[in-house]
């Protein structure tokens, strides 16, 4: 089976998580609570972690938010990343209060000197830095040189900041190059990957609502991941951040870069289908949430393309007229009435789960 060969990058330590250096691609998200409201923020961090988030970023817009990191970092089950704009003082305060990494946009943090001072502080505390280069806040000199926020301009900006950090031997750095335009994001990350071995944080910024943002993320992040580029990712959605984690997992699982439990395969339905397959597929998707094994489950609408097409599936159902044909790896095992399909699938899934957990 074809496997994606990942680009070799240097490992970056972010608390208990390693980004790059062959570590599993880590999933990030960002809280949208007021960070200083530690109860609400911890509640959201816990929901994100339950959904599979491995690194959580919090906004640090003011001193109260930076100071609240002390409580948050002590109680969070995953390392926290402080997101800072405009005020380098807040970044130092966030590091002092336990941020495992700070995300800064050097374009608005106050110049190279302030970036170097932050790096020295981060180095002393064992923290990491993400340099987030965004098309919307590129240096004026680069905009003038390149005419606009092109992929080349984004990469030149990132390499310039890296050079500054290398002068003081700081290399616990992750880079992100983002534009809301998917094509520029892909081009910039490809170009950077050809020039540097620092790990890349992938994302398409301001991607949109759940449906639109999912598509942009799947295309933008997915294209790069399929080429072996990328070490950590955040799917940006105008939605509950838990949805970002779910989408990130699906992208990684679709590319077989990580596995997170059962995968549903279902046919698009057509005029041959004689049951409510959409409803059945939704029910099966809900059922799969109860299992952890990495098996594939097919829900097919008719015998024409049923078991045969879903031969790759470990277990599945093909709908007939008011009945369901249950199959395993393309072979029919039994036929049940329509109202017993879910029960029959549950039985098969229980068996698979036992096998996959070695019980
Ligand atoms: S499996 Fe059957 S119902 Fe589903 S799309 Fe294919 S032919 Fe149509």
Image (tube, rainbow, N blue to C red):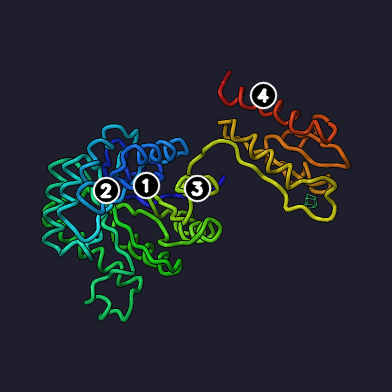
In the image, taking residue 66 as reference, residue 25 lies left or right, namely: right
Label 3, label 4: how far apart the Cα atoms are:
30 Å
Is the residue 176 above or below the residue 150 in the image? above
Closest to the observer, 144 or 257: 144
What residue does disc 3 label? Answer: 243
Which residue occupies 64% across, 42% down?
Answer: 264
The reply to whether the residue tagged 1 has its Cβ within 8 angstroms of ligand 1 is no
Residue beneath disc 2: 82
Marks 1,3: beta carbons within 8 A: no
Kindly report which numbered mark, 1 or 3, lies closer to the viewer in this rendering.
1
1 relative to 197 in the view: left or right: right
Q: CA distance from mark 4 to mark 2?
A: 44 Å
The residues bearing labels 1 and 3 have C-alpha atoms spaced at a distance of 15 Å
Answer above or below: position of 287 versus 123.
above
Tag 2, which secondary structure?
Answer: strand
Q: Between disc 3 and disc 4, whose residue precedes?
A: 3
Q: Quadrant of residue 84?
A: bottom left
Query: Mark 1, mark 4: which one is toward the viewer?
Result: 1
**In which quadrant of the rendered image does the C terminus lie?**
top right
Disc with the residue nearer the chain's start (1 vs 4): 1
Depicted 329 relative to depicted 268: above or below: above
Q: Give the distance between the C-alpha atoms of the residues marked 1 and 4, in whole angstroms.
A: 42 Å
Mark 4, mark 2: which one is toward the viewer? 2
For disc 4, the marked residue is 351
Q: Is residue 322 left or right of residue 4?
A: right
**Residue carrying label 1:** 33
- Looking at the image, which is closer to me, 251 or 71? 71
Front one among 175 and 283 = 283
Pointer 2 residue Cβ closer than 8 Å to ligand 1: no
Mark 4 is surrounded, within 10 Å at the Cα level, by few (under 14), some (14 to 19) or many (20 or more) other residues, namely few
Determine the secondary structure under disc 1. Answer: loop
């Amino acid at each position: 089976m074809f496997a994606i060969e990942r680009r070799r990058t240097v490992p970056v330590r972010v608390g208990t998580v390693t980004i790059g250096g062959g570590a599993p691609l880590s999933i990030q998200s960002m809280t949208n609570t007021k960070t200083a409201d530690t109860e609400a923020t911890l509640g959201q961090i816990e929901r994100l972690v339950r959904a599979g988030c491995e690194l959580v970023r919090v906004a640090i817009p003011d001193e109260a938010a930076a100071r609240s990191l002390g409580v948050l970092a002590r109680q969070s089950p995953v390392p926290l990343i402080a997101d800072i704009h405009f005020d380098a003082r807040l970044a130092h305060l966030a590091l002092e209060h336990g941020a495992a990494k700070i995300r800064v946009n050097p374009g608005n943090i106050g110049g190279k000197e302030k970036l170097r001072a932050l790096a020295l502080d981060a180095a002393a505390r064992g923290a990491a830095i993400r340099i987030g280069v965004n098309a919307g806040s590129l240096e004026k000199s680069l905009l003038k040189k390149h005419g606009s926020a092109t992929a080349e301009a984004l990469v030149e900006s990132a390499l310039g900041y890296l050079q500054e950090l290398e002068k003081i031997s700081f290399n616990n750095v992750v880079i992100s190059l983002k534009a809301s335009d998917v094509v520029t994001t892909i081009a910039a990350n490809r170009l950077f990957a050809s020039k540097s071995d620092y790990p890349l944080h992938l994302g398409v910024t301001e991607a949109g609502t759940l449906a639109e943002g999912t598509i942009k993320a799947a295309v933008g992040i997915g294209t790069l991941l399929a080429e072996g580029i990328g070490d950590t990712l955040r799917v940006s959605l105008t939605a509950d951040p838990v949805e970002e984690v779910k989408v990130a997992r699906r992208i990684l699982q679709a590319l077989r870069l990580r596995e997170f439990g059962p995968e549903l395969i279902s046919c698009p339905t057509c005029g041959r289908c004689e049951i409510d397959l959409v409803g059945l597929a939704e029910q099966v998707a809900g059922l799969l949430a109860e299992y952890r094994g990495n098996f594939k489950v097919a829900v097919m609408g008719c015998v024409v393309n049923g078991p045969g097409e879903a031969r790759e599936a470990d277990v599945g159902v093909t709908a007939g007229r008011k009945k369901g044909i249950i199959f395993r790896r393309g072979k029919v095992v039994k036929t049940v009435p329509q109202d017993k399909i879910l029960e029959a699938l549950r039985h098969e899934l229980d068996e698979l789960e036992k096998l996959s957990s070695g019980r």
